[in-house]
Amino acid sequence: MTDPAAVERDAAEAASAFAHPAVAPDATAAYGEHPDHVVDFYAPRGETRDQAPLVVLLHGGAWRAPYDRLHVTPFADFLARRGFAVANVEYRRGSSLPHQNAEGPVAGRWPETFDDVAAAMDALPGLAATALPQADVRRTVVTGHSAGGHLALWAAARHVLPAGSPWRLPSPPMLRGVVALAPIADFAVAEELGVCGGASAQLLGGADHWDERLPYADPAALLPTGIATAVVQGRDDIVVPQQVAEAYVAAAAKAGETVGLTLLDAVGHFPLIDPAADACAVVAEEISQLAW
């Protein structure tokens, strides 16, 4: 049973992260026809070089419809104030209504969630050139929080997807690296721990599709990538516990790849995207180390 004090701390951290007013983007562009096929761009603030590294931000929320990109706009603005160009990506998530026999909104859509992230990543260099010319797409870092951390890792691993996958790239994507924040990075471990109410299995379409689809979706199965990767994780995270991140790092090591893991003491799930929290500055520094 989860410690009541930990639950209370998590609720306080979530309240702090969600208390910031939404920050409007400097530009918005569409990468497809669906209403969720949009990217919000944030220009680097203050004195910057002619061009700034581009940070692609993928929001979390267990791939469920009620959670959209709005809640990470303060984090996007925080990164912009650190001198980055930022692309905040929206994508299709699960239904807003519970499915039959489900306790709440179901996580993700197969294959639409993956279709969208792949399409957005492929379109971003062209979109950024028009919407945000300050962005240096040659220095792109992908980051994401929670379920968005999963999508960030997946986006960097498309070149190692199984042959025949519609999302597979013929060569590694042009990325400086990935900084995954409390990511759902190992689906098997996440399901064992009941992360987000079984969201990983829901994303794959349920238990009947688990074995078939896992090799196409689970970051722990898509290794090595050859892309510089760092994971930032709070030790007190009860939403996506550190065992999930540790399992991914161990899987990478077994595949012959080193993934950086930064564990933050007395930090839970939400301070990683909370501009008022010290953990957010740690995240920005991790991105800086890859981008500049």
Image (spheres, rainbow, N blue to C red):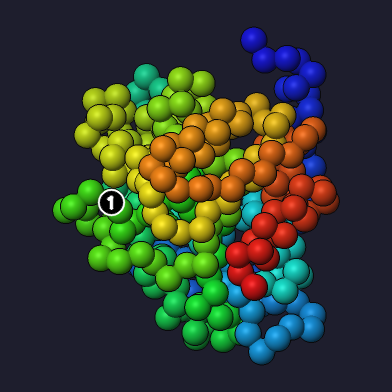
Q: Point out the image quarter for the N terminus.
A: top right
Query: Is 15 in front, or is 186?
Result: 186
Q: Position of residue 241 (x, y in %)?
A: 60, 29
86, above or below 206, in the image: below
Q: Position of residue 187 (x, y in %)?
A: 42, 32
Q: Secondary structure at mark 1?
A: loop
Residue 233 sits in quarter:
top right
Q: Residue at x 48, y 28 (%)?
A: 190
131, above or below 32, in the image: below
Q: Residue at x 29, y 24 (%)?
A: 207
Q: Point out the image quarter for the C terminus.
A: bottom right
Q: Position of residue 270 (x, y in %)?
A: 70, 41
Tally of numbered tags: 1
Query: Is 286 in front, or is 81?
Result: 286
Q: Residue at x 67, y 44 (%)?
A: 262
Query: Which residue reaches farthest top?
Result: 1
Q: Sort mark 1 into few (<14), some (14-19) or many (20+) by Cα contacts within 10 Å.
A: many
